[in-house]
Image (cartoon, grey):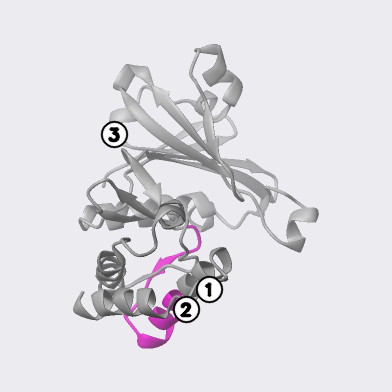
Amino acid sequence: MNFQIIEQGHATLLVAPELVGHITPSWFDLNWWRSRGVAIDSAPGRGESYFLHYRELALNLVWRHYKRGGLVAKLSEDRYLWAGLTQTRAYQEFTLTAELHARGLPVPRPLAAQVLRDGLSYRADFVTERLPEVKSMADRLESNLQQFPWHEVGKTIARFHRQGLDHVDLNIRNILLNSNDRVFLIDFDRCRLRQPQQAWQQGNLNRLLRSLQKLFPHQNHDPHWQRLLTGYKEG
């Protein structure tokens, strides 16, 4: 995917071609969207996501502001050490997501990113196109564990692993499914492409299993997990 880098004041913007001429740093200000009468929905979590609609291009968007987690967040909630544009979280996630999308993998299309440098630190944001009519794996499992397409999830994870994606935060909220049970992966912050290797691939799967056990602690997950692993091996 081609993109342009635009400098506007203190902001550096990474922009998909169709948004050149549309996007400004105002895009990353909720008050700007409110002033245009745009309804704003959100999803909880570290780095809260906002769902927006850009009327001019009929685009549904997901905007996420990068926030720290853990103890370090007490020192700085959303500032990161500046080490050059290409080392920023936003640049790396934007370009990785663009590469995955270009390879035909089921990911949301990256549209824009913003990096705001302030001396030795920076803040950042990332915008993707919103996938239509999807629910997270966590939400789908709330209604029916038995009928859930475990096999298809396993096949899709294997497809990403064959391409060398190490998803360091693979969990049941970062896996989305549409009404036709097509599976998507999201949230590639701190992820990377690397040589396929059993050790890190198993680490991804272990993290996914832990997130499943955490949300549904009183369920016997063995039969469901085996269905997922069968799909993974076939994929």
Q: For the residue labelled by badge 3, is the local secondary structure a helix, a strand or a loop?
A: helix
- Disc 1 and disc 2 in contact, CB within 8 angstroms: yes
Q: For the residue labelled by badge 1, is the local secondary structure a helix, a strand or a loop?
A: helix
Q: Which residue is mark 3?
A: 17
Q: Is residue 5 visible?
A: yes
Residue 179 percent location from the top left of the image = 27, 45
Disc ID at residue 206 = 2
At 53% across and 24% down in the image, what residue appears? Answer: 26
At 67% across and 58% down in the image, what residue appears? Answer: 69
Mark 2 to mark 3: distance in Å?
Answer: 38 Å
* Residue type highlighted by circle 1: Arg
Position of the C terminus, as image quadrant, is bottom left
Residue 176 percent location from the top left of the image = 37, 52
Q: Nearer the viewer, residue 183 or 163?
A: 183
Q: Where does the magenta region start and end?
A: 189-205
At 72% across and 49% down in the image, what residue appears? Answer: 77
Q: Nearer the viewer, mark 3 or mark 1?
A: 1
- Disc 3 and disc 1 in contact, CB within 8 angstroms: no
Looking at the image, is mark 2 or mark 3 earlier in the sequence?
A: 3
* Residue type highlighted by circle 3: Pro
* Residue type highlighted by circle 2: Asn
Q: Please tell me whether residue 40 is drawn above or below residue 87 in the rendered image.
A: above
Q: Nearer the viewer, mark 2 or mark 3?
A: 2
Find the residue positioned furthest to the right: 75
Disc ID at residue 210 = 1
Q: Nearer the viewer, residue 205 or 231?
A: 231
Q: Residues within 10 Å of mark 3 (few under 14, many from 20)?
A: some
Q: Please tell me whether residue 98 is drawn above or below residue 169 in the rendered image.
A: above
